Image (cartoon, rainbow, N blue to C red):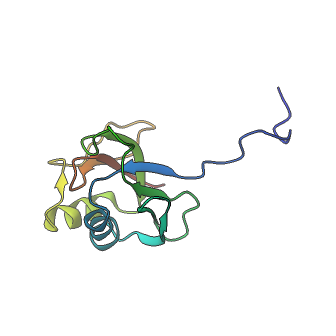
């Protein structure tokens, strides 16, 4: 086993990135509909904009950034799982808000928590799992 305090090692996940075409629409969805907090919204080099959102108290934010040149945004399975204390209520709230959510909460049993998938306005897929 190596010493994880060695200089140059990775110490945490800094952020996760979802490439989006329309950052304003993404902000409205992620903050307005999902209820995440906007943490950063800053211009940077060449007319770009760095935007980060996160659940209150979360260490790792989601960056909503334009895709690299020549790469299409949207339609990605992000691999991002958000947590909720009541996955059924979260599913019902998002469905009522018109979000593209799975028809029902998935319950696989065992160590797998109840969960559902949803798609943002650009077709990127995220998951919500029930926290213990």
Above or below, comparing residue 41 to residue 121 in the picture: below
Tell me what residue is drawn at x 82 percent, y 26 percent.
Answer: 1
- Most foreground residue, 81 or 76: 76
Residue 59 percent location from the top left of the image: 59, 61
- Most foreground residue, 74 or 67: 67
Tell me what residue is drawn at x 85 percent, y 42 percent.
Answer: 5
- Numbered-mark total: 0
Q: Residue furthest top?
A: 1
* Left or right, residue 55 beside residue 117: right
Quarter-of-image position of residue 99: bottom left
* Left or right, residue 37 beside residue 101: right
Quarter-of-image position of residue 51: bottom left
Above or below, comparing residue 33 to residue 116 in the picture: below
Residue 71 percent location from the top left of the image: 32, 38
Residue 45 percent location from the top left of the image: 50, 59
Q: Residue furthest front?
A: 46
- Most foreground residue, 11 or 94: 11
- Most foreground residue, 117 or 130: 117
Above or below, comparing residue 18 to residue 97 in the picture: above
Residue 82 percent location from the top left of the image: 41, 54
């Amino acid at each position: 086993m190596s010493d994880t305090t060695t200089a140059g090692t990775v110490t945490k996940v800094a952020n996760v990135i979802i490439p989006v075409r329309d950052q304003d629409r993404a902000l409205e969805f992620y903050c307005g509909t999902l209820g995440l907090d906007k943490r950063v919204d800053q211009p940077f080099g060449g007319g770009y904009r760095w935007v980060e959102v996160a659940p209150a108290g979360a260490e790792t934010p989601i960056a909503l950034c334009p895709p690299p040149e020549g790469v299409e945004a949207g339609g990605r399975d992000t691999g991002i799982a958000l947590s909720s204390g009541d996955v059924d209520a979260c599913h019902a709230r998002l469905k009522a808000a018109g979000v593209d959510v799975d028809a029902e909460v998935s319950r696989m049993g065992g160590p797998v928590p109840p969960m559902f998938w949803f798609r943002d306005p650009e077709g990127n897929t995220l998951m919500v799992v029930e926290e213990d």
